[in-house]
Image (cartoon, rainbow, N blue to C red):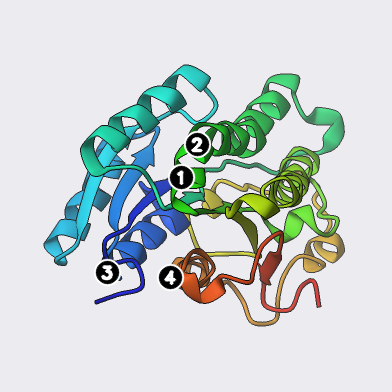
Amino acid sequence: MGRFTGKVAVVTGAGSGIGRATALRLASEGAAVACLDLAEDAAAKTAARTCEEGGQGRAFACDVSDPVSVLASVEALVGNLGPPDAVCNIAGIGMFAHTVDQTLDGWDRILAVNLTGTFLMCQATLPYLLERSGNIVNAASNAGIKGQPYSAAYCASKGGVIALTRALACEYLERGVRINAVAPGGIDTPMHAQFALPEGASPALLARIMSPMGFGRPEEVAGLIAFVASDEARYVTGSVLSMDGGITA
C-alpha cells in the first residue's frame, strides 16, 4: 500500500526530466498515472516504465498551450483511468536570451506553455478535483521568486505560475481543493540543457543563480511533489516550496 493507492494522478511533461521522475514516483506509490506530453512517444516510454516496475500508467498526447488539446486529453484520461485525484503541472520550456534580442514569438511561446498551459490544465481538471477533494501541484521555479539574468520571459512565466497558484488556493480554500507550487533551482534535466548562454553573458551575474551544492536531481523534486500531492500535506495549500540548493535562502 502506498500514499496514492487507488488514486489517479495526472502529470504533464511526463516524457522527460522532472515530469518523468514524478510520474514514476507516483506510480511507485500506487497511483494510476496519466502521462501527458507533447511528445507522445516519450510519454509512452514513461508509461511503459511504470508498468515494468509494477505500477500503472497510460500515455496521452497533449499540447498544454492548446485548450482543445487539453480538454481532449483530460476527457480521454478520465475515460481510461477515471477522474483525477492529483494534477501535477510540470510541462515547461525556457531559454536564455538578452532581453533586447528576445523575439516576441519566443516570449509568447514560453508564456503559453509555462503559464497558460498551467492555467488550462487547472481549469480543465478542477471540476473533477472538486468532486474528489483533490489537489494540484504546479511547477514554478526559483526564477519566479528572484531575478535571473537573461531570463525575462521565463521569470515572468514562473512568477505568473506562483501568482496563479496562490489565487486558486484562495479561491478554492473553502471547497476542499489544495493548490500548491514547487520552486526548483537548477535541476539536471534535458530542458536545463536547452538554456544555452547568450553571447557575452556575465559570469558574475550567472553566479547569482548557481548553488554551491551544484545541480539537483529530478528524483529529488519528484519526492517533494509526491509529498505535497499526498494526504500527508493536507494542511498545505497556497504554498510555494523551494528546492534550489539555498539560492533563495
Give the amino acid at mark 3.
Ser
Residue behind mark 1: 131
Residue at 38% x, 38% y: name it.
37
The residue located at (31%, 36%) in the rendering is 78
Kindly report which numbered mark, 4 or 1, lies closer to the viewer in this rendering: 1
Q: Nearer the viewer, mark 1 or mark 3?
A: 1
Which dot, 4 or 3, sits closer to the camera? 3
Name the image quarter holding residue 50: bottom left
User: Mark 4 = which residue?
Assistant: 219
Look at mark 2 in the image and give the residue it sits on: 127
Are the residues at dot 2 and dot 4 in contact (C-beta closer than 8 Å)? Answer: no
Question: Which of 97 and 171 lies nearest the eye of the viewer?
Answer: 171
How many other residues sit within 10 Å of disc 3, few (<14), some (14-19) or many (≥20)?
many
Judge whether 27 appears above or below 235 on screen. above
In-image side of 206 versus 49 (left or right): right
Judged by depth in the image, the label closer to the viewer, 1 or 2, is 1
- Badge 4 or badge 1: first in the primary sequence: 1
